[in-house]
Amino acid sequence: MKTMGYFPFLFFVLNVCASTAHADSENWQAHWAIPPGYFLEVDSTGYSVPVAIAMVPNPGSAPDSPLYYVAELGGRIAVVRNDRQVETFADGFYTLNRSAEMPDLGGVIGLTGLCLDEDTGYLFATYVHDIGDGRYNGITRFATNPGTFSLRPTETFDIHKPFMLGDSEFTRLPFGHQIGQCQVIDNTLYAGIGDGELTHRSRSAQSSFGKIVWMQFDGSPVAEGNTLDHGGITQAPDANSLANYLFASGLRNPFGQTRVGDNIVVADNGPGVDRVLTVRKNQDYLYDGSDASIATNAMVLYSPAKGTANIAFYPEGAASGITQLENNLLVVLSGVPETYIEDEPAEISAFEVEVDSALVMSRPRTLVKYVGNEMQVLSSIAIGRDGIYFAPVYGENAVPGISNVYRLSWAPEKSYPTSLGQYQNARAIMRNYGCRGCHNVFGDGGNVAPTLNATHLRRRNSERLASEEYASQLRRMVAGDRDSTDNRARQRVLNADGDKRLSVWTEEKILNPTFDNPESVMPLLGVSKREAEILAKFLLTDKKRSNGQNSK
């Protein structure tokens, strides 16, 4: 059972220059697969463990006008200008003493969320911090220019008290079960808070853990019924009463939230399954530590759990014009934060919803998938005027590393090398075609078919393929089946010698398992020629695996 919740926030590393980032990411397009017609590009670079992105809704036109903000786990908020220059907006505005750094799970803690209010120019940042001998969730409000925002805050205001009411102190390392993303709806601030790894607090009215909380911009309780609930006026709610801050309860790790019509939709990460659900005021969503409780009231379930880390709604008529995604929820599935597990990659999932009811109108499908061989995690997503933005937590070729912000757009006239189902990465190809269902590959997979690695392939096949008996067999098949398309494959093998014959045979066996043996039980998978070449090279290269990662 997965107990750490796949919270996608790793360790803080120092920034280095952008040129290092480019050198570190030379082959990044082979690491991210997208559907045909889309295009992915680097929008900005130079980030250290980026965990959230907040777009300016209507940015100014000047080159130095703020375009979006990026939160880094270690506590820096970066601001990206129209000209894609990256500057520091704020840093060091809270105190947190970590006991460890990631990939140790004790380091999965820090600055986690950003949200903006265009009318006031407020930027809100959510985080975990130390106060005296205690550790609590917190929010800081940064004042900037209304409408266009700014490169630096004009003042800061801390919202700490609501998170110190009741049983709301961390009593052990949260491992990411902390405050997550926030959003502003109708002049009200909403934030999701994880259960602090203590299940009983999720449904307790005496704790802010496992809840969606709401408040006014100064941290006081909401004084007027929220328009989403069509409530009436209330009188001066008590700011010392935790109950006045609790919007919904019974959640485990509601890291991401977004608005769909008059509905608040939350991505809630569970221990064994994840759910996406709508939440309403004063409702208990029943999490009690079990997968059955997480499955309750769900719009969509991800089973097994894939780490629902964030969520965004792509509206009809969005400025970036990706009509295929109109009225779709985009769910960030983080992947595993502390190790590389190729069968549970970071990805972005999409499904259509009906706006008024938030009913699901299509099954989830993959929009972006990480298909590289390194540890990688996703947390952030944002809808911009020219595309969909996200940032991997790790650098592309190193941990730690310098991360990019990527922008996904609809551009069928452009060529992108790695489409979903047509990968350039061998492990991703095997994952896509389910090879490990039958074969054991470097210690992982089934045992109903031969083991696939260089040693076993050579041991089983080299002597046989080099024999005159095998060559005679192929020549007889060619002579007896002159019109068969399999003869091309047979002739390629006959024309190759030594290791080259093994390589050619492996490619052809992947493409058509029956080309030299009509009784082969291996199915025809529909692998492309390029994919077969990548797989053959990978399988015939000696390598070892250790602790879930391949050595270099």
Image (tube, rainbow, N blue to C red):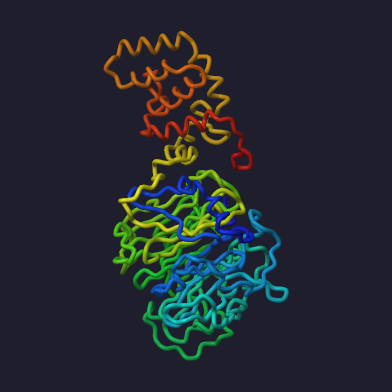
Q: Residue at 53%, 68% (x, y): give it.
A: 113
Q: Closest to the observer: 32 or 24? A: 24
Residue 331 percent across, percent down from the top left: 43, 59
Q: Nearer the viewer, residue 244 or 307?
A: 307
Looking at this view, name the residue that lies furthest to the right: 133
In the image, 404 versus 239, the foreground residue is 404
Indicate whether 117 appears above or below 365.
below
Residue at the limit of the structure toward the left, as seen here: 483
Residue 423 in picture, x, y percent from top left: 43, 41
Above or below, comparing residue 371 to residue 179 in the picture: above
Q: Quadrant of the C terminus?
A: top right
Q: Quadrant of residue 541?
A: top right
Left/right placement of residue 165 relative to residue 40 reads: right
Q: Is residue 277 visible?
A: yes
Q: On the image, which quarter does residue 512 sit in?
A: top left
Note whether 498 is above or below 246 in the view shown: above
Residue 71: x percent and y percent? 54, 67
Picture coordinates of residue 271, whole percent (x, y): 54, 55
Q: How many numbered marks are there?
A: 0
- Vertical placement of residue 428 versus 243, above or below: above
Kindly indicate the quadrant of the structure image that contains residue 482: top left
Is residue 293 visible to us here?
A: no
Q: Taking 76 as reference, is 309 left or right? A: left
Q: Residue at x 60, y 58 (%)?
A: 10
Residue, far bottom: 235
Left or right of 154, for residue 14:
right
